[in-house]
Image: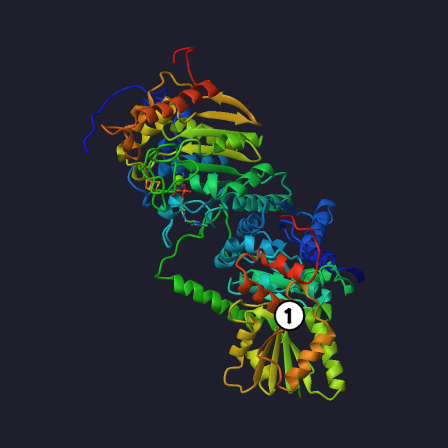
Amino acid sequence: MTQPIKFYQTGTFTVGNRLLPEDKRTVQSSIARDNSLNSGHRACQGCGEALGARYAVDAAMRATEGQLIAANATGCLEVFSTPYPETSWQLPWIHSLFGNAAAVGSGIAAALKVKAAKAGLPEAVTRVIAQGGDGGTTDIGFGCLSGMFERNDDVLYICYDNEGYMNTGVQRSSATPPAARTATTQPLGPEPGAEFGKGKNVPLIAVAHEIPYVATATVADLHDLEAKVEKAMSLRGARYLHVFVPCPLGWGAASCDTIRLARLARETGLFPVFEAEDGEITAVTKIRRPVPVDEYLRLQKRYAHLFGAKGHPETIARIQAMADKNIKRFGLLDVEGAA
Amino acid sequence: MIKQIEGSQAVAEAVALCRPEVICAYPISPQTHIVEGLGALVKSGELVPCEFLNVESEFAAMSVAIGSSAAGARTYTATASQGLLFMVEAVYNASGLGLPIVMTVANRAIGAPINIWNDHSDSMSQRDCGWIQLFAESNQEALDLHIQAFKLAEEMSMPVMVCMDGFILTHAYEQVDMPEQAQVDAFLPPYEPRQVLDPADPVSIGAMVGPEAFMEVRYLAHAKQTMALDRIPEIADEFKEVFGRDAGGLVRGYRIDDAETIVVALGSVVGTLEETIDTLRAEGVKIGVLSIRCFRPFPMAAVRAALARTARVVVLEKSFSVGLGGIVSTDVRLAMVRIHVRGYTVVAGLGGRPITQDSLLRVLRLAVADELKNLTFLDLDWDIVNRHLAREAASRHTGPLPEALLRDIGASAPRNR
Ligand SMILES: Cc1ncc(C[n+]2csc(CCOP(=O)(O)OP(=O)(O)O)c2C)c(N)n1
Ligand code: SF4
Ligand SMILES: [Mg+2]
C-alpha cells in the first residue's frame, strides 16, 4: 500500500532525536538501550502493543538501572514474544495466567521486600512491573488488579489497551468502545457493533483507589509514555499506566496507521491522556485542535458499517458526543471555548 | 516443648518455625485459625522478616504465592473447600511451573449445598493437579508434616499440599510436641531455588510449549513424583533422627501383618478405625488398618505390598466421584491388580456426618462376612432418599432438593412462598 508522505509537526518532539538534548531523547535512541523486548518476536506489522511494551519496559529498565522483573498476563504480548525455546525478553520475566499478572507482581514484590530486609536494606532495589492487555486487565484480571492497588503493593501495572481480546481472535472486552465491530459484537441489527452504555473506565477506577500514581498514554507520544514510566518508577507503591495501543489486525487498520490512530484517539478526545496522584487528577495533555471523530473512525474497518450509503451518521454523532464529553470532563481544550 | 493447643495454632507455629518469607491467604473456614495465627506471629515481630499479604481471593492467594516463590522466597498459603476450587487454575499453574509452595488444605466439603464441615472432596478434586498430597492423622502429625513438606517441596521443586481434616483436627485442642527452632533449622536447609527471577541472570518462566515437548514436560512431572516416592520415606527417617518421632512416610499399617481384612483410609478417621479394629481383634477378627499418608504420588508399590496377603480390602473414604463411586478405592484397586482379594468401598462422613465406632463396627462385620455391598454409603438414610425419589416421580415441581429433604425429615421452617 502506498501512502502520501506528509511533513508536519504534530507535537513538540516530532523533530526527531538528533536535534533534541540528550535527556529529552527516547530510550530507544541510545545504543545503551536495554532492548528488553528484543527483535525477532512475532507481533503483526505495526502492532501498537509491541511498540508500547518496548518503550515502556525499556524506560522502566533505565529508571531502575536494569533491576527489574516483569510479570505478564496471557495475551498477544505474551504469545508473540515467547514460545519456548525462544524469548524476546531480556529481563527476568514470568507468565503465569491470564487473570493474575497483578497478583503475581504482588508476590514478586513481597519476595523482594523480604530479601531486601534480610540484606539489611530499607527497601527493595529490584522493582516489579506487571503487564497485560485490556482483557487481562479490565476483565479477568480486574479482581487481582484492584487487590494489588488496594494493598498499595510496590508494582507498576501497565495495561496495553487495544480495545479487545486480540489474541483469541478479536472479541469484545469491557474496553471495547461502542459501535466497534468485534467477533462477538457483530455489525448486524439496528445497533451494529458494540452496544452503547457498556464498558468501564479502568484508569478512573484506578484513580478512585487513591494509589500514588495513575497515568494514561498512547504510542503516538513515546516521550510522554517514557516520562510517565520514569515518573512511576520514581514512586513506591501501586501505580497504574494505561497505554492506548492500536491493533492493525483487530481494528482493520493499515499497519502504517498505528501512530496516526493513536494520535487521533487523543486529538478527538476519545482517549483522554492524563495523570493522577493519590486520587487527584494532576495533569492532562491538552488538545490543540480537536479532530472530528470520523477522521479517526474512517481509518478502521471495525467502524466500516457506520459509513457509506447504509451508514449510521446518528451513531457517529453519539461517538462525537462521547469525545465532547471527555473534552469537557477532563478540560482537554488548550484554548478556552475553542471547541 | 509439650503444649496443649488447637491444631490450627500448632500448624501456624510449625510453619513459622520453617521461616517462611511470604505468607498470603484468604479466609475460609476451617482454615482461618491457621492464617490468623501466622498473621499474629508476623505482626508481633516473632516471625521476621516475613511478608503477610491479606489478598482478595484464593485465586490471588495462589497467584501471589507463584510470584513470590518464583522470586526465590519460601512461600506458604492455606485454604479449604470452595477456596481450593476458586484457585484451581493457579494450583495447576504452580505445579506446572515447578514452584515449591506449601499449602495447608483444611479439608472441607464442596457445595452445593454449601457445607462447612469435613470431608475430603476438596483435596480429592485436585488429585491430578501435580501437587504432592500428604494427609495428617493427628495434630502432631499435621505439624510434623508441614516441616517435612517444605523440605520435600524445595528439594523436588514441586508444591506440596498438607491435608488435615477441617474442625476434627484444625479446631481440636490436643497435646503436641512443638519442636525447637534449632531442630527445625538443623532439619530444613535454606531454600535454594532451581529457577529464580533475578536481574543478574534473566530467565523467562512460563512461556508457551507446543506439542513438540509438552508430553515430555508432563512426563517429567510424573517422573519427579515417582522420585518423591523414594524421598518421602527418607525424609521421614531424617525427621525421626532430628525430632525423635515417626511422622509422614507413604503408608502406615496398624495390626495388618496377619490381617485377613484390611481397612484403607486417610486422615483423622484412621484413629477411630484403630480403636474399632482393637474391638474387633478382641472378638478374634483378624483385621487391620492401612493409613495412606501420601496420596500423591500414589504409593502403588507400598499399598500393593501391604495388601498382598490379605483376603479382603475395605476402602473407607470421605470422598466420592459422582457417577463412579470411590476415588481412593479406584487407586487402591489399581494397586491390587491381579491380587485376588475382595474389595469394598465405604463412602463415609460426607459433609461432616459423624463416623461413629458403632457404624464402623456394623459395616466391618458385614465386610468380614462378605455381606457388604461393593459400594456402601455409611449411615445413608435410604428412607429419605426413596421418599424424595418418589416425590420427583410424582411431581415436576419439587423445588430445591435439600430444602425438600429437610422438610421431609421435619426440620421445620415457615414457607416463604
Ligand atoms: C482463564 C482463561 N480464559 C481465557 C483464556 C483465553 N485467552 C487467552 S489470551 C485472551 C485474550 C487476551 O486479550 P487481552 O488481554 O486484551 O490481550 P491482547 O491479546 O488483546 O493483547 C484470551 C481470551 C485464557 N488463556 N485463560
Ligand atoms: S493481533 Fe493486534 S495486538 Fe496482537 S500482535 Fe497483531 S497487532 Fe499486535
Ligand atoms: Mg486487548
The quarter of the picture where residue A6 lies is top left
Quadrant the C terminus of chain A occupies: top left
Amino acid type assigned to the residue bearing label 1 in the image: Asp
Residue B311 x, y percent position in the rendering: 60, 87
Residue shown at the point (59%, 61%) measured from the top left? B122
User: Residue B10 versus residue B155: which sits nearer the camera?
Assistant: B10
Residue B185 in view here: yes
Residue B246 screen position, x and y as percent? 70, 72
Q: Nearer the viewer, residue B215 or B184?
A: B215
Q: Which residue appears at 56% of the width and 81% of the height? A: B304
- Horizontal side of residue A13 vs B2, given as left or right: left
**Residue drawn at (41%, 45%), measured in percent from left and top?**
A90
- Picture quadrant of residue A188: top left
- Local secondary structure at mark 1: helix
Query: What percent of the width, then of the height, locates residue A316?
Result: 33, 25
Which residue corresponds to mark 1?
A: B383
Q: Which residue lies furthest to the left in this view?
A: A2
Chain of residue at mark 1: B
Tell me where residue B407 appears, x and y as whole percent: 66, 59
Viewer-nearest residue: A207 or B226: A207
